Amino acid sequence: MSTARDLLALLLLIAATVLGALWLPATWFHDHVVEREGFLAVTVPLAEDPAFQRTLSDSAVDKVLGEERVPGWIQDRLTPLAEEQAENLTGTDVYATMWAATMAELHGALFAPGASDLEVDLSPAIERILTPVEEHLPVTIPRPEETTVTLATIPDVPLLPVLSSVTPWAQWAGPAALVLLAAALLIAAHRRTMTALAGLGGILAGSAVWWLGAQIRTVVPDAVDQTAFLGPIVQVFEGRFETAMVPQGVILLGAGALVMSFGLVLIGLRRR
């Protein structure tokens, strides 16, 4: 009878360990990637990054100057004026709104099935560039008929939709692990031994969290974090994930070590 109780308690401890290892990473992923507000809280401030600014402003200038709509005799005067206004664009509300809309589009594309193009409508930026430019030119510059450009192709990541359907329950993984741990200690016939094993489970869970945080850049496929435009954004998330998970993994590991030490002390006292 006691063997059956210990076996059941051990199974509960294994389940608690798995839930404990998943709890922190899954909760972070849900709050900062799956949730649109959390995703935008990370990506919207990236609008101040010069590399991203050049991507949008250069695209707008290319639209203004391209397609041979502008007469050749005015092209030489238009180009430096448009480039100057494009540099000023990045500090305007027009740019901030356009970037926020692009990031919202990116969030939807990440969880859509199949690969998809990340497109942005540059018409507000083009208008913002040309309006002051026309004050210095004797003609009205014709607007491009097509103002949408493709910034990047978002690869298909089948795991993301799966995770997005599971992670809303992540916040309950921690409490559930504690309930299973308490049940295991109550059921076990050899509670001192089970306490030591519970500590070992905490060490394993903490180690898993620490390893995932430290190795997240190798876990994420290169097709996601090494691509143009998308890659630098994903790398920002990787850095934040590492910053959050590594210390939390160490704390969980340390707590497990303390519990395991306590259990081993209890076992030693009983044998005396």
Image (cartoon, rainbow, N blue to C red):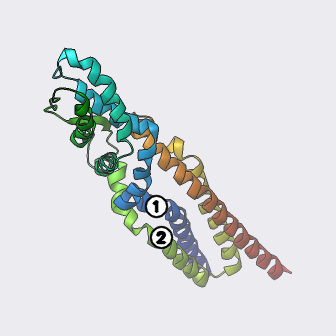
Picture coordinates of residue 33, whole percent (x, y): 40, 55
Residue lying at 66% horizontally and 75% vertically, measured from the top left: 194
**Left or right of 97 in this view: 28:** right
Say the numbered circle drawn on residue 173: 2
Left or right: 179, with 201 as reference point: left
Label 2 crowd (10 A; few <14 / some 14-19 / many >=20): many
- Pinpoint residue 98: horizontal percent, then vertical percent: 29, 47
Horizontal side of residue 41 vs 197, given as left or right: left
Type of residue at label 1?
A: Ala
Instruction: Please state which of residues 221 and 15 is positioned toward the viewer in this rendering.
Output: 221
Q: Residue furthest right?
A: 272
Which three-letter amino acid code belongs to the residue tagged 2? Ala
Q: Which residue is located at x 54 percent, y 70 percent?
A: 16
Specify the quadrant that holds the N terminus: bottom right
Front residue (pair 171, 87): 87
Q: Can residue 230 be seen by looking at this rendering? A: yes
Image quarter where the C terminus lies is bottom right
Task: Please rate how many residues cluster around mark 1, counting C-alpha atoms within 10 Å: few if below 14, some from 14 to 19, many from 20.
Answer: many
Q: Quadrant of residue 208?
A: bottom right
Whether 17 is drawn above or below 186: the answer is above
Residue at disc 2, secondary structure:
helix
Q: Nearer the viewer, residue 212 or 243?
A: 243
Q: Position of residue 49 (x, y in %)?
A: 46, 42
Between discs 2 and 1, the one toward the N terminus:
1
**Quarter holding residue 120:** top left
Q: Mark 2 touching mark 1, by CB under 8 A?
A: yes
Numbered label attached to residue 26: 1
168 vs 114, left or right, is: right
In the displayed structure, would residue 145 be above or below residue 77?
below
